[in-house]
Image (cartoon, helix red, strand yellow):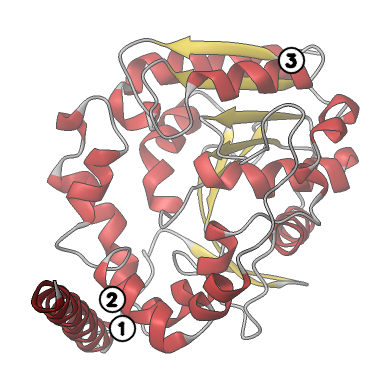
Amino acid sequence: MLTALRWTAKALAAGLLLVVFLGGACRMAAAWRESEGAEPPADGRLVKTADGDIFVEARGPDGGAPVLFVHGTAAWSGFWLAVADELGRQGYRAVAIDLPPFGFSSRSAAGAYSRRDQAERIASLIAALGLDRPIIVGHSFGAGPVVEAAMRHRERFRGVVLVDGALGLPAEGDAYPPDRKLVRMLIEQPIVAEPLVAATMTNPWLTRRLLAGLLYKKEAASEAEADILRKPFSRAGATAAYARWLPSLLFADGAAMSAAPENYARLALPVALIWGRQDAVTPLAQGERLQRLVPGSTLDIIEGVGHIPHIEDEPAFLATLTKRLKEIVAP
């Protein structure tokens, strides 16, 4: 028995050392990669706002009905460009933005990435661009800042579209689980968070595999789509910035207005929900619950796709999105 325990302890120690070694190696590789200093795309620009510089890429005529696109975790404006290009051709003013720390926007030195922080950045950008009540589209984890902005600055928006929104609301009748203080304390340490991020989120060797894990149509996780996601990884300080943001992903933002299910009934804006039938990340049941929470909202289900409909079935997604945009713009 004692011998078995010793072997178990040795195996655990060896496993821990291997994890530490691999994490350290990934962190060193990230530092080397980030020394290249990726430049933002030439067809976009940094917009100065009251809450920092925000990188945007815009398509379509200046006078078109404005549509603002917000990305999800570890994505950026480039991941929306195929959709923005098409809407621009249809006459909309499609503006895709980078919410920090992702993409090429200025990062927060204080790590201010709560939903309220991100909502204020969105509101400041709308003011800086002079957009007249845009329709705002949020995908996945980007849905939180989008809904938060709509709740806090309702008068600035014409409508909201949520695509497979990852809002993390507690189950009906439940409260948010309490924070695990030890886990939070560890995640907030750069020596823990940065190797973890370097081994996963900013690891270019894993990008395509992680992307495929979000999709029902695995073939949509093409090398071209993975390359789009990889582009900001070599920007200086990317891994450290993502690590500062990591608690926002792992722990509920209970102070946010959008964290309270009862606030959704008071949203008082046209809300369209678009969901992939086979989404295993934010299952359809979450979209159905959102529809119940928001009076008058619509729910469109796209068959045969998972968490990212706009790359899994772009034609079906565009048809659904443009139908809802026309309905919101028409009044």
Q: Which amino acid does the dot numbered 3 rest on?
A: Arg
Q: Quadrant of residue 181?
A: bottom right
Label pair 1/3, CB-CB below 8 angstroms: no
Q: Give the image location of residue 83, x and y in percent.
A: 42, 33
- Does residue 177 sit above or below 53 in this rendering? above
Camera-side residue: 270 or 262?
Answer: 262
Q: Give the image location of residue 294, x and y in percent.
A: 78, 21
Label pair 2/3, CB-CB below 8 angstroms: no
Q: Which amino acid does the dot numbered 1 rest on?
A: Gly
Q: Give the image location of residue 320, x and y in percent.
A: 49, 14
Kindly report which numbered mark, 2 or 3, lies closer to the viewer in this rendering: 3
Q: Which amino acid does the dot numbered 2 rest on?
A: Ser
Q: SS class of the residue under badge 1?
A: loop
Q: Give the image location of residue 287, x and y in percent.
A: 59, 21
Q: Which residue is mark 2?
A: 234
Task: Report the Cα–Cα distance between label 2 and label 1.
Answer: 6 Å
Kindly report which numbered mark, 1 or 3, lies closer to the viewer in this rendering: 3
How crowded is the residue under tag 2: few (<14 C-alpha within 10 Å), some, or many (20+)? many
- Please name the residue shown 71% across and 62% down the image: 121
